[in-house]
Amino acid sequence: MVVLPVFVQAPWVHVYPFSALLFSFVIFTLGFYLLRFSSYKWASIGSLLLGVSWSWLGGCLFWGWLRAHPVWHLPVESIALPIAITLLDTRWKIGASFYLASLLGTAFTDVMIVLTGVMKSWPDIVEAPFSEASELLTLTASELVSPFSLISIALAAVLIVIIANWMMKQSLNHPDSSDAWLVSSAALTTTLWVDGLFFLTTLIQPQLSGLI
Protein backbone atom coordinates (compact mmCIF):
# COMPACT_ATOMS: atom_id res chain seq x y z
CA MET A 1 0.00 0.00 0.00
CA VAL A 2 2.95 2.32 0.58
CA VAL A 3 4.93 1.12 -2.42
CA LEU A 4 2.14 1.45 -4.99
CA PRO A 5 1.77 5.25 -4.78
CA VAL A 6 5.53 5.68 -5.25
CA PHE A 7 6.25 3.26 -8.09
CA VAL A 8 2.83 2.87 -9.77
CA GLN A 9 0.82 6.00 -9.11
CA ALA A 10 3.57 8.52 -9.90
CA PRO A 11 4.23 7.38 -13.50
CA TRP A 12 0.51 6.69 -14.10
CA VAL A 13 -0.57 10.16 -12.98
CA HIS A 14 2.25 11.69 -15.02
CA VAL A 15 0.80 10.26 -18.23
CA TYR A 16 -2.94 10.00 -17.42
CA PRO A 17 -3.59 12.29 -14.43
CA PHE A 18 -7.38 12.34 -14.62
CA SER A 19 -7.83 8.54 -14.74
CA ALA A 20 -5.35 8.11 -11.88
CA LEU A 21 -7.32 10.68 -9.88
CA LEU A 22 -10.59 8.85 -10.53
CA PHE A 23 -9.00 5.61 -9.31
CA SER A 24 -8.78 7.08 -5.81
CA PHE A 25 -12.59 7.02 -5.72
CA VAL A 26 -12.56 3.39 -6.87
CA ILE A 27 -10.32 2.52 -3.93
CA PHE A 28 -12.52 4.52 -1.56
CA THR A 29 -15.73 2.90 -2.80
CA LEU A 30 -14.28 -0.61 -2.44
CA GLY A 31 -12.99 0.18 1.05
CA PHE A 32 -16.30 1.72 2.12
CA TYR A 33 -18.23 -1.33 0.87
CA LEU A 34 -15.97 -3.79 2.71
CA LEU A 35 -16.12 -1.72 5.88
CA ARG A 36 -19.90 -1.54 5.92
CA PHE A 37 -21.01 -4.91 4.56
CA SER A 38 -18.28 -7.47 5.33
CA SER A 39 -16.98 -9.55 8.23
CA TYR A 40 -14.47 -8.09 10.68
CA LYS A 41 -11.42 -9.27 8.73
CA TRP A 42 -12.60 -7.76 5.44
CA ALA A 43 -13.92 -4.69 7.24
CA SER A 44 -10.40 -4.07 8.54
CA ILE A 45 -9.06 -4.31 4.99
CA GLY A 46 -11.82 -1.94 3.92
CA SER A 47 -10.77 0.58 6.53
CA LEU A 48 -7.17 0.29 5.34
CA LEU A 49 -8.24 0.90 1.74
CA LEU A 50 -10.02 4.07 2.82
CA GLY A 51 -6.74 5.40 4.17
CA VAL A 52 -4.98 4.36 0.98
CA SER A 53 -7.57 6.25 -1.08
CA TRP A 54 -6.79 9.48 0.80
CA SER A 55 -3.05 9.04 0.19
CA TRP A 56 -3.74 8.20 -3.45
CA LEU A 57 -5.94 11.29 -3.88
CA GLY A 58 -3.34 13.65 -2.43
CA GLY A 59 -0.60 12.03 -4.50
CA CYS A 60 -2.62 12.39 -7.71
CA LEU A 61 -3.36 16.04 -7.09
CA PHE A 62 0.30 16.80 -6.52
CA TRP A 63 1.96 14.58 -9.14
CA GLY A 64 -0.67 15.35 -11.74
CA TRP A 65 -0.76 19.14 -11.57
CA LEU A 66 1.75 20.48 -9.05
CA ARG A 67 4.77 18.20 -9.47
CA ALA A 68 7.05 21.10 -10.41
CA HIS A 69 6.31 22.85 -7.11
CA PRO A 70 7.78 20.67 -4.33
CA VAL A 71 6.86 23.19 -1.63
CA TRP A 72 3.23 22.11 -2.17
CA HIS A 73 3.99 18.40 -1.77
CA LEU A 74 3.24 17.98 1.93
CA PRO A 75 0.30 20.46 2.07
CA VAL A 76 -1.44 18.69 -0.83
CA GLU A 77 -0.71 15.23 0.57
CA SER A 78 -2.33 16.47 3.82
CA ILE A 79 -5.68 17.00 2.11
CA ALA A 80 -7.43 14.42 4.31
CA LEU A 81 -5.57 15.25 7.55
CA PRO A 82 -8.58 16.74 9.44
CA ILE A 83 -10.77 13.79 8.41
CA ALA A 84 -8.18 11.21 9.47
CA ILE A 85 -7.67 12.81 12.88
CA THR A 86 -11.43 12.94 13.44
CA LEU A 87 -11.84 9.24 12.60
CA LEU A 88 -9.05 7.89 14.82
CA ASP A 89 -11.53 6.72 17.47
CA THR A 90 -14.00 5.15 15.05
CA ARG A 91 -14.19 1.93 13.02
CA TRP A 92 -12.22 3.83 10.35
CA LYS A 93 -9.20 4.05 12.65
CA ILE A 94 -7.04 1.54 10.73
CA GLY A 95 -7.32 3.58 7.54
CA ALA A 96 -6.85 6.84 9.43
CA SER A 97 -3.75 5.45 11.14
CA PHE A 98 -2.30 4.25 7.84
CA TYR A 99 -2.85 7.66 6.27
CA LEU A 100 -1.35 9.58 9.21
CA ALA A 101 1.70 7.31 9.43
CA SER A 102 2.25 7.58 5.67
CA LEU A 103 1.93 11.35 5.95
CA LEU A 104 4.52 11.36 8.74
CA GLY A 105 6.84 9.39 6.47
CA THR A 106 6.23 11.92 3.71
CA ALA A 107 7.10 14.74 6.11
CA PHE A 108 10.39 13.03 6.97
CA THR A 109 11.14 12.59 3.27
CA ASP A 110 10.40 16.22 2.44
CA VAL A 111 12.55 17.50 5.30
CA MET A 112 15.45 15.40 4.06
CA ILE A 113 14.88 16.63 0.50
CA VAL A 114 15.28 20.19 1.80
CA LEU A 115 18.29 19.48 4.04
CA THR A 116 20.20 17.57 1.35
CA GLY A 117 19.56 20.18 -1.35
CA VAL A 118 17.45 17.94 -3.58
CA MET A 119 14.50 20.34 -3.55
CA LYS A 120 16.33 22.97 -5.58
CA SER A 121 16.88 20.42 -8.39
CA TRP A 122 13.37 18.96 -8.26
CA PRO A 123 11.61 21.40 -10.67
CA ASP A 124 14.36 21.00 -13.29
CA ILE A 125 14.13 17.20 -13.11
CA VAL A 126 10.36 16.87 -13.41
CA GLU A 127 10.09 19.46 -16.20
CA ALA A 128 13.02 18.22 -18.28
CA PRO A 129 12.58 15.92 -21.33
CA PHE A 130 12.68 12.24 -20.41
CA SER A 131 16.20 11.66 -21.76
CA GLU A 132 17.60 14.63 -19.83
CA ALA A 133 15.57 13.95 -16.68
CA SER A 134 17.22 10.56 -16.18
CA GLU A 135 20.66 12.11 -16.25
CA LEU A 136 19.67 14.96 -13.95
CA LEU A 137 18.07 12.56 -11.47
CA THR A 138 21.15 10.34 -11.38
CA LEU A 139 23.41 13.37 -10.91
CA THR A 140 21.24 14.68 -8.06
CA ALA A 141 21.21 11.29 -6.36
CA SER A 142 24.99 10.99 -6.64
CA GLU A 143 25.33 14.35 -4.86
CA LEU A 144 23.66 12.78 -1.81
CA VAL A 145 26.76 10.66 -1.28
CA SER A 146 28.38 13.26 0.94
CA PRO A 147 29.16 13.19 4.68
CA PHE A 148 26.47 15.73 5.63
CA SER A 149 23.76 14.11 3.51
CA LEU A 150 24.57 10.57 4.60
CA ILE A 151 24.70 11.51 8.29
CA SER A 152 21.42 13.43 8.02
CA ILE A 153 19.72 10.53 6.24
CA ALA A 154 21.07 8.06 8.80
CA LEU A 155 19.79 10.15 11.73
CA ALA A 156 16.37 10.45 10.09
CA ALA A 157 16.29 6.69 9.52
CA VAL A 158 17.14 6.01 13.16
CA LEU A 159 14.41 8.40 14.31
CA ILE A 160 11.87 6.70 12.06
CA VAL A 161 12.83 3.29 13.47
CA ILE A 162 12.48 4.62 17.04
CA ILE A 163 9.02 6.04 16.33
CA ALA A 164 7.93 2.85 14.54
CA ASN A 165 9.09 0.74 17.50
CA TRP A 166 7.20 3.03 19.88
CA MET A 167 4.07 2.51 17.78
CA MET A 168 4.63 -1.23 17.98
CA LYS A 169 4.77 -1.06 21.77
CA GLN A 170 1.59 1.00 21.83
CA SER A 171 -0.18 -1.88 20.09
CA LEU A 172 0.57 -4.00 23.15
CA ASN A 173 -0.50 -1.34 25.63
CA HIS A 174 -3.77 -0.57 23.83
CA PRO A 175 -5.41 -3.87 22.80
CA ASP A 176 -8.59 -2.14 21.63
CA SER A 177 -6.63 -0.27 18.93
CA SER A 178 -3.70 -2.64 18.45
CA ASP A 179 -4.43 -3.14 14.73
CA ALA A 180 -4.29 0.60 14.11
CA TRP A 181 -0.97 0.96 15.93
CA LEU A 182 0.51 -2.03 14.07
CA VAL A 183 -0.59 -0.59 10.73
CA SER A 184 0.96 2.76 11.66
CA SER A 185 4.24 1.12 12.59
CA ALA A 186 4.32 -0.95 9.40
CA ALA A 187 3.44 2.02 7.17
CA LEU A 188 6.14 4.24 8.69
CA THR A 189 8.77 1.49 8.50
CA THR A 190 7.85 0.71 4.91
CA THR A 191 8.22 4.39 4.03
CA LEU A 192 11.84 4.13 5.17
CA TRP A 193 12.49 1.11 2.95
CA VAL A 194 10.71 2.72 0.00
CA ASP A 195 12.85 5.85 0.30
CA GLY A 196 15.95 3.65 0.36
CA LEU A 197 14.74 1.74 -2.68
CA PHE A 198 13.95 5.01 -4.44
CA PHE A 199 17.49 6.25 -3.76
CA LEU A 200 19.05 3.06 -5.15
CA THR A 201 16.75 3.16 -8.17
CA THR A 202 17.73 6.72 -9.03
CA LEU A 203 21.38 5.69 -8.98
CA ILE A 204 20.98 2.46 -10.97
CA GLN A 205 17.91 2.90 -13.20
CA PRO A 206 16.30 6.36 -12.81
CA GLN A 207 13.57 5.59 -15.37
CA LEU A 208 12.00 3.21 -12.83
CA SER A 209 11.98 5.66 -9.92
CA GLY A 210 8.51 7.07 -10.66
CA LEU A 211 9.72 10.68 -10.31
CA ILE A 212 10.14 11.12 -14.08
Image: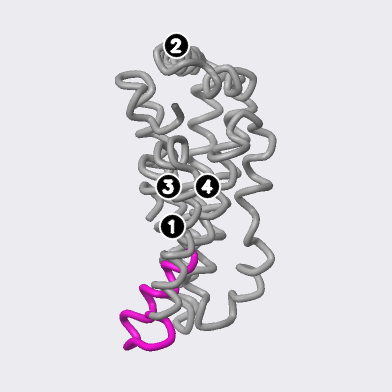
Q: Is residue 90 magenta?
A: no
Q: Distance from label 4 to label 2 (Cα)?
A: 24 Å
Q: Amino acid at mark 2?
A: Glu
Placement of 92 over or under 64, stated as above or below: below
Marks 1 and 4 in Cβ contact (< 8 Å): yes
Q: Which mark is residue 160?
A: none
Amino acid at the residue labelled 3: Pro
Which residues are drawn in magenta?
Answer: 34-51
Three-letter residue code for mark 1: Phe
Q: Write the residue at 48% across / 41% down.
A: 158
Where is 127 relative to 97, above or below?
Answer: above
The answer for how far apart the CA atoms under marks 3 and 4 are is 9 Å
Q: Which mark is residue 23?
A: 1
The residue that disc 3 covers is 5
Q: Main secondary structure of the magenta part?
A: helix
- The residue that label 2 is drawn on is 132
Residue at 65% in and 56% down: 79
Say which mark, if any, is on residue 60. Answer: 4
- Identify the element where label 3 is drawn: helix
Residue 134, x across and y down, in percent: 40, 16
Tell me what residue is drawn at x 64 percent, y 44 percent.
Answer: 74
> Which of the two marks, 3 or 2, is nearer to us in this view?
2
CA–CA distance between discs 3 and 1? 12 Å
Which of 179 and 209 lies nearest the eye of the viewer?
209
In the image, which is nearer the foreground, mark 3 or mark 4?
4
- Mark 3 neighbour class, 10 Å CA radius: few under 14, some 14 to 19, many 20 or more: some
